[in-house]
Amino acid sequence: MQQSAVPELAHTHTRPIHWVATATAVAGVVALSSLVQPGSATAAQAATGTHTDSAPAALAPPSTTGVDFPLQCGPVRAVVAKKATGDLDGDGKPETVAVVHCDSAMGTPPDGVYVLTGSTDSGTPRIVATLVDPKERLTVTDLSLHTRTVGATLLGYSSDAVPNCCPDLKTPVTWHWDGRAFVRSTPADAHSV
């Protein structure tokens, strides 16, 4: 057997101290990488020789907190059951659509559907449209917002004789802003439950 020209290296056999050193080094790299973050990504590059200011932060949609919804709830409070946000009127500012009902311990309280917009003077969002009035005795099971159109499924009653527990009508509806008001439309094939 021929002897190696290179002397035997002392660290060719791993020992526990080597694993501790490796784990410490890896932990240090992970800790350091969590402190150093890359800048924000942009979709377009600035042209050479031009100056670009940073874009304004995206506008936050109106919050439902602190809004006085027009519900007669008596001793219980109004509850926001569902909400969706988006730019409904094309002005570049988001609106919030909220499904609200009274917090009743029994039965199925009717829902109201309201459109909120941000207020420039008071800071509190304000209601700009009522899409479903609670007096209609309807329950909203779905809520969506796509391409400036609000969609919902409404459960209702064919007559006052139908008990509140058992709605017998199911109607999908949409509302679209026409520039002056929200226009409601119902598909021709709306059916009973």
Image (cartoon, rainbow, N blue to C red):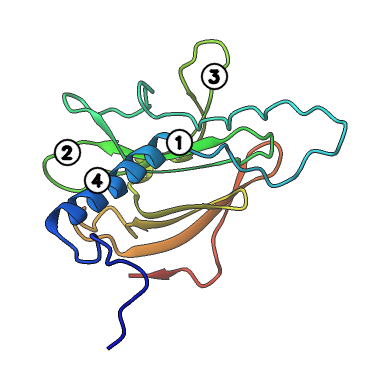
Q: Is residue 165 left or right of residue 134?
A: left
Q: Is residue 92 left or right of residue 170?
A: right
Q: Nearer the viewer, mark 4 or mark 1?
A: 4
Residues at marks 3 and 1, CA–CA distance in whole angstroms: 38 Å
Residues at marks 3 and 2, CA–CA distance in whole angstroms: 30 Å
Q: Which residue is mark 2?
A: 104
Q: Amino acid at mark 1?
A: Val
Q: Looking at the image, which residue is at 30% across and 49% down?
A: 26
Residues at marks 2 and 4, CA–CA distance in whole angstroms: 57 Å
Q: Looking at the image, which residue is at 39% across and 29% down?
A: 64
Q: Amino acid at mark 2?
A: Ser
Q: Nearer the viewer, mark 3 or mark 1?
A: 1
Q: Looking at the image, which residue is at 42% across and 29% down?
A: 63
| 121 in relation to 193, above or below | above
Q: Amino acid at mark 3?
A: Ser
* Numbered tag placed on residue 24 in the rendering: 4
Residues at marks 2 and 1, CA–CA distance in whole angstroms: 50 Å
* Numbered tag placed on residue 36 in the rendering: 1
- The location of residue 170, given as percent across then percent down, is 38, 64
Extreme-right residue of the structure: 49
Q: Earlier in the sequence, mark 3 or mark 2?
A: 2
- The location of residue 130, given as percent across then percent down, is 48, 36
Q: Secondary structure at mark 4?
A: helix
Q: Earlier in the sequence, mark 4 or mark 3?
A: 4
Q: Earlier in the sequence, mark 3 or mark 1?
A: 1
